[in-house]
Amino acid sequence: MHLQVSLTFDLSASSSLADLEEAIVTQGHESMCQALQQAIKEWEQHQRRCPTCGRDEVRVEGTVGRTLLLVFGRIRLALRRYRCQHCLHRWCPARRLLRDLRGQQVSPGLREAAVLAGSSWPYRHAAQLMERLCGAHISAEEVRQLTMQQGNQQAHAQQQHAEEVVASAPKEEKGEAGVAGIDGGWTHSCEQAGGMEGKVAVLACNKQVQEPKAQPDPSQLTWYELAKRSAKGKRLGPPHKRARWMQRRYVATFAPSHALGSLAEAAAREVGLDEESSVVVADGAQWIKQEAQRHFARATHILDWFHLWRVVRKAIRETQREQQHPETWLTQERTQIKDWLWHGEVDPAIKRLQSWQEKGEGKALEAALTYLEHQRDWIGSYEAWRQAGYPVGSGVIERAVSLVINRRMKRGGMRWKRTNATALVALRTTFLNTDWPREPSHRAFV
Ligand SMILES: [Zn+2]
């Protein structure tokens, strides 16, 4: 099959670059549509054999109209209908070519692009961008329907696959040490006042420490260079080592928490996380503890340090204000209690807080005490964990919640149904997981 499409257009001598670009793009889209029409005609020429009797004496007997939506625009096709001269069988050969569409108008390429756009941006915005960038004619509602359809399938498939993996016997070989971060992220809901919680987990392993860039010796720098560096906020201290988890996998759902547990365990097995030498970091929510116990029982459980410290610091601040202690008291108590907790000594910290309670009740103090009591089993020596190279804060997981949920789903005026939210996060995690191995600057999906 050989075909040629030409591009002809008129331009005025005074056209600007923008005019030229616009004209070429518009004409280009028309040529692409023509190319497809011709390609289908050409293809039909090669399908002249009668499917019933196998002879090739056929004649064209009219056409059948069909509209297609493609990445480069909308086209109207006239599909030929053949009639066999021998057995009088009538058929339309191009139907076989369009079989993949299952009676729909949207081509597979446009469908894929629409799903990617719809899971990255609000639907209206996605439809406008697609029209602007590639000339596709697709409405916001069509983008929504395609995204939801694909998302529901994806969510279902992920869940089923996870249940199967969890039910199967674990691998024999030893995996790698890594981290499982689990957290919730809230969105507005149209079914539930106060919103609903999406559950996200990120499984990461293969930690690589990146060697820091060599810092110049300050004594060799001029005053001008020093001033410039300090204006940019660059420190001259010893360089900071950065660690990166080279392999990550995200899972998320708005379904009940046990669904996330299975998804997380399946993903952990897939990235090759070794349960015993891995850690689970979370903020101490009840559902997370339950799922961690069920699916990562042998891992080390770490209560997110920043979360813990925020609660306790608030109680210290409140007590100082209520009982009118001087600022020096505040600094002193803060340092002492922080030091205890950082080394995993919960008892002296609790005793200290209780001793304040005798002098006066406080809401934050009460909350901090309950929190410490409830989270005890997840608190340990943060110092030792840090030394061992484990993450003790929720940087990895907070970023995961932001990537999977917040950037797409927490925009002004958005409200979600639970099933639709699950469909969308299923797509987002799929795109993230396939995009992740690429260089950061080449990632399409953020
Ligand atoms: Zn025939």
Image (cartoon, grey):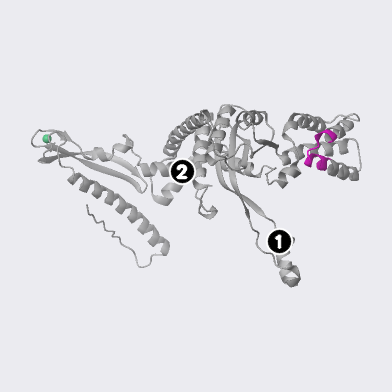
| Extent of the magenta region | 337-348
Residue shown at the point (60%, 40%) measured from the top left: 401
Query: Could you classify mark 2 by the number of other residues whose Cα lies within 10 Å: few (under 14), some (14-19), or many (20 or more)?
Result: some
Residue at 64% x, 33% y is 298
Residue 388 horizontal/vertical position (percent): 70, 45
Vertical position of residue 222 compared to residue 364: above or below: below
Q: Secondary structure at mark 1?
A: loop
Query: With respect to residue 400, does 208 lie above or below?
Result: below
Q: Where in the figure is residue 274, as x and y percent of width and height?
A: 59, 39
Magenta-colored segment: predominant secondary structure: helix
Q: Earlier in the sequence, mark 1 or mark 2?
A: 2
* Residue type, label 1: Lys
Asked whether 279 or 356 is in front, the reply is 279
The residue nearer to you, when weighing 169 against 134, is 169
Task: Out of 298 and 54, give the one closest to the viewer.
Answer: 298
Percent from the top left, x then y, of residue 340? 82, 40
Ligand number 1: quarter of image: top left
Residue 307 drawn in magenta: no
Q: Is residue 335 left or right of residue 165?
A: right
The residue where tag 2 is placed is 116
In the shown orientation, is residue 214 left or right of residue 250? right
Horizontal and vertical percent position of residue 49: 15, 40
Quarter where residue 114 is shown: top left
Residue 386 visible in the current orientation:
yes
Residue at the disc numbered 1: 234
* Magenta-colored stretch includes residue 339: yes
- Decide if residue 71 is on the left or right side of residue 422: left
